[in-house]
Image: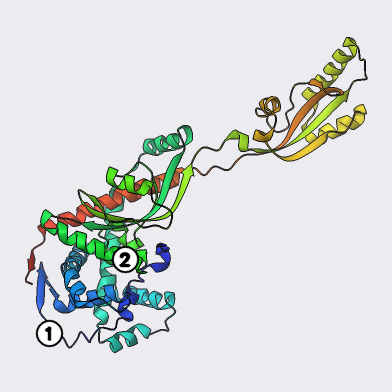
Amino acid sequence: MKPQNPAACRFALAVALLVAGAAPLAAQEQRIIAVVNTEIVSNFDVDSRIGLNFATVQGGASAETRERVRPQILRQLIDERIQVQEAKRLGVSISKREIDAQVARLERANGLPQGAVDQILRRAGSSRSALERQIEASIAWGRIVSGRLRPQIEVSQEEIQETLARYSEGEPVTEYLLAEIFLSIDNPDQEAEVERNAEELIARLKGGLPFPVAAQQFSQAASAIEGGDIGWVQKGQFEDPIEQVLAGLDVNEITLPIKTPSGLYIYAMREKRVLAPASPDDALIEIAQMVFPLPPGATQSDRETTLALAETVRETVEGCADLERVAQELRVPAPTRLAEVRIGDLAADARARIRPLKVGEMTEPAPAPGGVGMTMLCVRQEPKSNLPSAADIEENLIRQRIDNAARRYLRDLRRVAVIDIRA
């Protein structure tokens, strides 16, 4: 199963409702199923969301399946009511214009003509309000998370530098580019039900439901608004049950539900990479090799004179272009230029002499075939490192902490809410 790019699928979950072939919902009996503080959730709301969630399943969902997911759908709707109520308490309002703009983006992203949403909804006998309320909750909660929680999250420069040091000085580090779906288990009585819902969701993902759409529909993590995208995460940062599964997961694979004390996780492995400091031996260089010739049978005095001349050139020449000029003046063979040489591919003795050179510097004169030789470093192209920047590390740490804070925030809101479930 290949997880899709969440940015391309944002709000794409609403398409499911647009193509649903369910019976007209408006004609169904209206019953209050739950009251969240002072706001109701009706059977119409639940049936609308079930139609949305299963519209992408070939042939729809059976009556048994639809009935089995009703409790989960109800919990999602309750959470959305709580999120919107909290947004209003904080003075966060989502305008009709913003919601309409998201619907318009939805139409464009799915190649639908302008106004097609309303036409398809009318043909399906469904309600645009169901779609609008979902969009409203998604935007409102995202705004609370970014506006209220984000300013409370701090990452110190010491933490960033410690992380950078681990990358730069330690062993190579494996990172995962992940998307997640989190299904909360708030009390033990829900465990079996949430596990059944997770299995049903896995079946739908295997059947072709895009992971970002499933995350937006079902996930209770703050990353749901981003299609579950949690960016690059370092191996070793997870709880043990998750770590063990991810270690054996291939790119484009999706895990089975992973049980943790807080709930069930499903992960999509979008990409893997190994981060390690760039090796100095991977630098590409251009060098100029110059030989001061000695005649056959040269005396020790001849060798000393040539070595002295070479040392004088080494101390006075300025760059490889100047080295060619000096060779012409001294009437010695022109330097031999070698380009795009990897330092690690040089012979061990040459590598040891050239590695510490700066551009424009020369090795010490040394005996060479036919005379005394020296090598100048003309160009050095440092190897590119795939280590993350300080900004990348900071953003990743912030993202993880925001997700945890948002989860606690919603849990606390549930605890103080007056929720009356009637069916």
The residue under the point 10% across, 79% down is: 31
Q: Residue at left 17%, top 69%?
A: 68
The residue to which callout 2 is attached is: 214
Q: Is residue 249 above or below residue 135?
A: above
**Label 2 is placed on what type of residue?**
Ala
Where, by quadrant of the figure, is residue 301 drawn?
Answer: top right
Distance in Å between CA atoms under marks 2 and 1:
29 Å
Contact? badges 2 and 1 (CB < 8 Å):
no
At 23% from the left and 58% from the top, the residue drawn is: 183
What's the coloring here? rainbow
Secondary structure under the numbered disc 2 in the rendered image: helix
The answer to whether 95 is drawn above or below residue 151 in the figure is: below
- Residue 330 as seen in the image, left or right of residue 181: right
Q: Is residue 227 left or right of residue 363?
A: left
Tell me the kind of residue under disc 1. Answer: Glu
Can residue 388 be seen from the camera position used here? no
Residue designated by label 1? 29
Asked if residue 134 lies left or right of residue 28, the reply is right
Q: Position of residue 233 (x, y in %)?
A: 38, 47
Of residues 76 and 92, the one nearer the viewer is 76
Q: Is residue 244 above or below residue 198?
A: above
Using a 10 Å C-alpha cutoff, classify the residue at mark 1 as few (fewer than 14 neighbours), some (14 to 19) or many (20 or more). few
